Image (cartoon, helix red, strand yellow):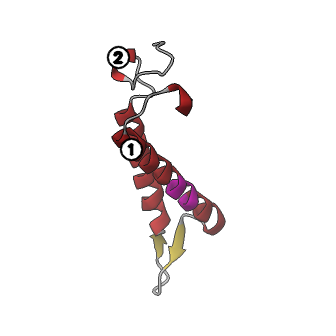
Amino acid sequence: MFANFELDTHHLKLLTLAAQAWDRGEGARQALAKRGVTYKDRFGQPCVRPEVAIERDSRLAFARLVRELGFDVANPDARPPRRDGRQ
């Protein structure tokens, strides 16, 4: 799919950031699968792991960056132009 679109430098930066957000979210998801969503603090109270916020924030960042790139927009005029001239 990447080869089908003419992407400017700023599009490539947004795409890179989206990929990094995805990777960070996946890393947090794997840590949560291994360790669980909560842990007990020094007082024995359950606490939410920091990876929960990392996963949430990464998911939101990824969605916003993909929306900014316009790859899934129904309006073809809002997308980056295709190299082959098709809509």
Residue at 62% over, 69% down? 35
Q: Which mark is residue 14?
A: 1
Residue 73 versus residue 53 in the image, above or below: above
Question: From mark 2 to mark 1, how far is it between C-alphas?
Answer: 19 Å
Q: Quadrant of residue 7?
A: top left
Residue 30, percent from left and from top:
62, 60
User: Compared with residue 68, is residue 21 higher up or lower down, i.e. above or below?
Assistant: below
Which stretch appears magenta?
A: 23-28
Secondary structure at badge 1 equals helix
Residue sitting farthest toward the bottom: 42
Question: Looking at the picture, which amino acid does disc 1 mark?
Answer: Leu
Which is nearer the eye, 19 or 61?
A: 19
Quarter of the image with the N terminus in it: top right
Residue 77 numbered mark, or none: 2
Query: Quick one: 50 or 23, which is closer to the camera?
Result: 23
Towards the viewer: 75 or 39: 75
- Mark 1 surroundings within 10 Å by alpha-carbon count, few (fewer than 14), some (14 through 19), many (20 or more): some
At label 2, the amino acid type is: Asp
**Earlier sequence position, callout 2 versus callout 1:** 1
